[in-house]
Image (spheres, helix red, strand yellow):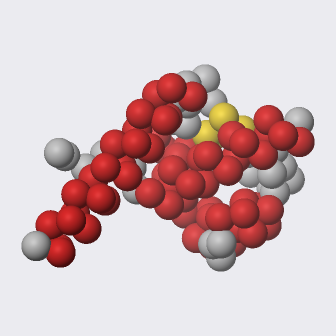
Amino acid sequence: MTPPEIDLESLRVFRFVRDYHRQHGMPPSQREIGTGTFMAPATVMQHVARLEAKGWLTREYKIPRSIRLSDLAPTDSQFDSLWDEFIALIDAQNASELD
């Protein structure tokens, strides 16, 4: 099994932004993302930048609450498949360490 082209923390940030927007009807702030993912603000922005580079998120600099899903963001089923692949990879690595 090959590792996905994105890391688990970036997936957590993406999922938080997606779910927050659905629940509240507006994008989360940088602080809210950090609180919701247990990450420091600088770490949040590193992952937001990675997700922007992949084309999954967009934002307007110096505009609060401007982080949004882009048209290139994965659908729910695509994201769930990627998430499941990541968890399976982690489980396989943990199992091999126990052997």
| Place of residue 56 in the rendered image (x, y in percent of width and height, measured from the top left) | 55, 36
Quarter holding the C terminus is bottom left
Q: Quadrant of residue 83?
A: top left
Q: Residue 93, relative to residue 65: is it above or below?
A: below
Say which residue appears at 46% left-offset and 28% top-offset: 78
Residue reaching furthest to the front? 99
Q: Residue 67, relative to residue 42: is it above or below?
A: above
Residue reaching furthest to the left? 99
Q: Nearer the viewer, residue 18 or 77?
A: 77
Say which residue appears at 58% left-offset and 70% top-offset: 43
Residue 2 horizontal side relative to residue 70, left or right:
left
Q: Quadrant of residue 42?
A: bottom right
Q: Is residue 66 visible?
A: no
| Place of residue 10 in the rendered image (x, y in percent of width and height, measured from the top left) | 51, 55
Q: How many numbered circles does the render carry?
A: 0
Say which residue appears at 49% left-offset and 35% top-offset: 80
Q: Residue 16, relative to residue 25: is it above or below?
A: below
Say which residue appears at 31% left-offset and 59% top-offset: 90
Quarter holding the N terminus is top left
Residue 87 horizontal side relative to residue 93, left or right:
right
Q: Is residue 77 visible?
A: yes
Residue 99 horizontal side relative to residue 34, left or right:
left
| Place of residue 21 in the rendered image (x, y in percent of width and height, measured from the top left) | 79, 40
